[in-house]
Image: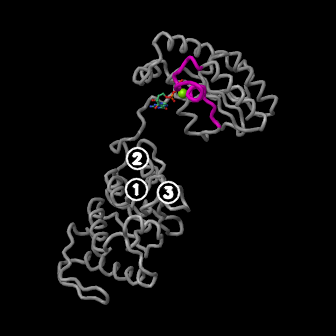
Amino acid sequence: MRIPDPALVVLVGPSGAGKSTWAAARYRREEVVSSDALRGVVGSGPHDLDATEEAFTLLERIVDARLARGLTTVVDTLGLDAERRSRWLLAARGAGLPAVLVLMDTPDAECRRRNSSRDRPVPASALAGQLRRHRELVRAAEAEGWDLVHRVEPDTGRVADSAAERTVHRTTPERRTSQGLRVVLQVSRFPWGEDPAGWMAAIARAADEAGFAGLALMDHLIQIPQVDRAWEPIPEPWVTLGLVAGLGTGLSLGTLVTPVTFRPAGITAKAAATLDALTGGRAFVGVGAGWWAREHAAYGLDLPPARERLDALAAAIETMRALWAPGTKAYDGQRVSLPETTCYPDRPDASR
Ligand code: GTP
Ligand code: MG
């Protein structure tokens, strides 16, 4: 069932029913007006019950202001107060917006289970009262005059986040578009909050499921101004790709692009060969000449003139190819001479 947009969306469900989670997955943060969040603004935190009255005063003002501008407004409270519901419904009518009631159908036992595993559970007696009032409301909701009553099916299944529950691709499937292209998701921003590894894994799994042929990471030492602010996280990509390599996706992995000014070419060849071995042949290498003076200066790296960098790029490609080639014999090429080319682990398919 499609929820209209813009609309007033009023969430209803006991603690732990999953209201905030549902809203966060579907709406922008600014669209969700949450009594818990506002308790955190005017009180000591989302659980500061002494701040409830002021939090709701603010909530009502925000709801009115947003609706008057015709903006989508998701009201994230328990939703069990009939007087407030009817006021929000009237405000939506006044603004000419559809009014939607979202009922969480999470089973009581599941709410109790989630509640008890929280840092600050609601007391059992309070939760019992919420569950009772919620059941009454479920019966009466249709009569309240909402344009749509949307019921959220219970999802008691574990969130499918373990690699074991997913298809594990051991070889690279031919992930091509109808024109024969292989499309790679390039990740250049890393807004991973408190959970870098979890965020990165979720992005990679989503890319895998969406059918991308691969995943690439930007290689910079400081986040570039074209993308985000300098103090936002920008991880070392080869280390990060090691984490993605362990997820069992079918994605090809590499960087777009690794500047030859950052690491000696042999070291990049080694990192890529290792990634290739660990992923069963799913590594690729993107290389460039490097360009951003600021990150080079900050990390004590040389940034020679463009002509020299382009020569270095050509030499780097030659070095990597020589090291990846089968065998260990000496290499004497156009720009590069190496006394031996011993680079193990080997690429499973060195002709690739
Ligand atoms: P209150 O703010 O206390 O009223 O709760 P809420 O209804 O906003 O619940 P919230 O979205 O905070 O979810 C409570 C807990 O249940 C969190 O730990 C969520 O991660 C988990 N949860 C929420 N939705 C789902 C779901 O669809 N499936 C599963 N398995 N867990 C969920
Ligand atoms: Mg919540």
Vertically, is 81 above or below 10?
above
Q: Determine whether label 2 and label 1 are within 8 Å by CB.
A: yes
* Mark whose residue sits in front, 3 or 2: 3
What is the C-alpha distance between the residues marked 3 and 2? Answer: 17 Å
Q: In the image, which residues are magenta? A: 31-51
CA–CA distance between discs 1 and 3? Answer: 12 Å
Q: CA distance from mark 2 to mark 1?
A: 10 Å
In the rendered image, residue 282, in percent from the top left (x then y), is placed at: 34, 63
Q: Which residue is mark 3?
A: 230
SS label for mark 2: helix
Is disc 3 placed on a helix, strand or loop?
A: loop
**Which residue is at 34% across, 78% downward?**
316
The residue that label 2 is drawn on is 196
Q: Position of residue 111 (x, y in %)?
A: 47, 21
Q: Amino acid at mark 1?
A: Pro
Is residue 343 in view from this perspective?
Answer: yes
Numbered label tally: 3
Mark whose residue sits in front, 1 or 3: 3
